[in-house]
Image (cartoon, rainbow, N blue to C red):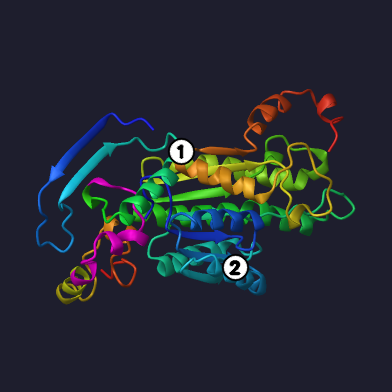
Amino acid sequence: MIDATGMPQTAVVVGGSSEIALEIVRALASRRLDRVVLAGRDPARLEAAAATLRERGVAEVSVEMFDAATPEAADGLAARASAALGQVDLCLIALGDLGTAELDALDSSRVAAMMAANVTAPAAAATAFARVMVEAGSGRIVGLSSVAGLRVRRSNFAYGAGKAGFDGFLSGLGEAVRGTGVKVTIVRPGFVRTKMTKGLPDAPFTIDPLEVATAVVTGLETDADIVYVPSVLEYVFALLRLLPAAVWRRLPG
Amino acid sequence: VPSFLGVLKRFGAGDDGHLSFPEQGWTLALDIPVGTSPALAGLLDDFDRRIAECGGRVYFAKDGRLGPGLVGQMYPRLGEWAAVKRRLDPDGILVSDLSDRLRLEPSGGIGQA
């Protein structure tokens, strides 16, 4: 169960080999988390992630298959994870595909795959787990959105548009579960140094996965609806969203 | 950490209950609002460790965040309680948020019902 300070004992990670998600799980494991299900599409990477969590003292870690290409599998995943954990305290959704924003490479199947990874599958997973949690009367959904979705820009527009969709979906889902004992938290990081962003130059306010993890734990403790990492991005983007397009277009990065 | 209610009591000798809280000595209860400080959980975990180290215990009925790790040390007769529980409730049907949080059931506190 989730204790009085907001700390979960059981968690499902959708996108189970995400570096940011694993850092969050490690931080929670140093508190109360002792049973975890990692769901994703690459068994070898999931098993490797599971092994590192077991080394960290997480008593029970299991692996489930979930591919963003088949979002409708989310209902089955939620049922299996819920059976394995008894009660799902936390569902952490960490799917994403930075993909490309180059028109040459962005054919319709690539657009569809990026939308599946960034919005369709994450939204399906959030909904499937929300339904299980509403039934149980408690639970917390934490979705990794991105500031890239707050104002979509040229350099990563397919990714940003997907994140914008997921972000909006989560805020509506949060309203839909109000009063049921279930809560939704949206995490909006800036540029995080991970394998997804490897090779890209650092953007302003670049952070490491550990900083996201620390902010998410604090968000759970203080019952936050939205977590910006770093927190200053809330104010930076409040301004950036107001910039005229002609200025926005000229900003570097 | 703000605390608007504090109760300090002196107890006499404890009794025979397996999970009875009182024993010879002092008890301090503090009402502490959660969700205000990110440092609170760590501070209270540290209190738990210190209390357990000096042979004290946390009162289940007043607490909402103790983890499973120190329960056996705080309540040395936990094993006897668990044996009675197993005998009277072999299928582990009687569970609660508390037994779940403290992992009091050998299966991990998840009900079969």
Quarter-wise, where is residue B100 in the image? bottom left
Front residue of A147/B53: it is B53
* Label 2 packing within 10 angstroms: few (<14), some (14-19), many (20+): some
* SS for dot 1: loop
| Residue A50: x %, y % from top left | 57, 69
Q: How many labels, in total?
A: 2
Question: Which circle marks residue A52 in the picture?
Answer: 2
Is residue B96 placed above or below A154 in the rendered structure?
Answer: below
Most distant residue in the right direction:
A104
Amino acid found under the numbered disc labelled 2: Thr
Question: Which circle marks residue B40 in the picture?
Answer: none
In the image: residue A241, left or right of residue A137? right
| Residue A52: x %, y % from top left | 59, 68
In the image: residue A1, left or right of residue A145? left
Q: Quadrant of the N terminus of chain B?
A: top left
Magenta segment: B62-80
Residue at image point 55% right, 60% down? A13
* SS for dot 2: helix
Q: Which residue is mark 1?
A: A222
Amino acid found under the numbered disc labelled 1: Thr
Is residue A185 placed above or below B96 in the rendered structure?
Answer: above
The residue marked by circle 2 belongs to what chain? A
